[in-house]
Image (spheres, rainbow, N blue to C red):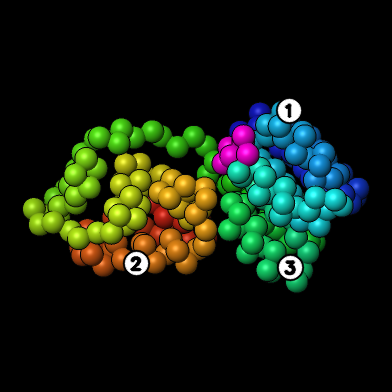
Amino acid sequence: MADKHILVVEDEEDILALIHYNLTREGFRVSCATSGEEALKMAEGDPPDLVILDLMLPGIDGLEVCRRLKTGKQENKSAVIMVTAKGEEADVVTGLELGADDYVTKPFSPRILLARVRTALRRNETVPEVDENDVIHVDDLVIHPGRNEVLAAGEPVDLTYTEFRVLHFLAGRPGWVFTRYQIVNAVRGDDYSVTDRAVDVQIVGLRKKLGPYGKYIETVRGVGYRFKD
């Protein structure tokens, strides 16, 4: 993980120097930008694995940078950790809905930032591909993508299209933990309005309809969901 490339976008020199020092000390390759425009150019020329992004930037602000990173050529490949000031709760919510992976609030502990960097990088690793035609068998639960059908102990389970897609996505990658954004993006595409509530509602519905098989969908507190391995 130490060979990962991290882009730090921060216009306050002392904070930029602090983040740069702690990341390079851990072996990360670090690039720095002091404006949104500069950050976008750097991200296009040398795509980072992760962006540490201050929201209050001159020119193009952090939210717009996040939006462009998540909808441009590097869509969903660069994890984003927002750096915010106290009282910016509305911006944090907007940033998460745009696809940011996490946030830290100023002032922050370098140790906490490093821990969140490692967590975000792990989450953003390549998701294993699943053949869309493969039938998934988990005990007496059968998920048939070709028929858009789920059988539990031989009995059909009536799922909505979105519920089926969420179940197929998770069950096809057992043990992998996915954020709510990753789930919605995989199921509905990046143009779908992403909210924590949207995913949670689908999961609640799935668990209820699956009955005893709903236990396979596990909540990973502070991260998202996974299908039990």
Quarter placement of the N terminus: top right
Q: Residue at x 49, y 54 (%)?
A: 192
Q: Which mark is residue 164?
A: none
Q: Is residue 24 visible?
A: no
**Discs 2, 3 touching: Cβ within 8 Å:** no
Write down the quadrant of residue 47 in the picture: top right
Q: How dense is the environment of label 2, judged by Cα within 10 Å: few (below 14), some, or many (20 and up)?
A: few
Question: Disc 2 or disc 1, which is closer to the eye?
Answer: 1
Q: Amino acid at mark 1?
A: Gly
Within 10 Å of the Cα at label 3, are there few (<14), some (14-19), or many (20+) other Cα atoms? few
* In this view, the mark in front (1 or 3): 1
Residue where numbered disc 2 is placed: 204
Q: Which mark is residue 45?
A: 1
Where is mark 3, residue-wise?
88
Q: Position of residue 72 (x, y in %)?
A: 63, 39
Percent from the top left, x then y, of residue 109?
Answer: 75, 56
Highlighted range, magenta: 72-77
Whether residue 220 sits left or right of residue 135 in the image: it is right
Residue at mark 2 to residue at mark 3: CA–CA distance: 30 Å
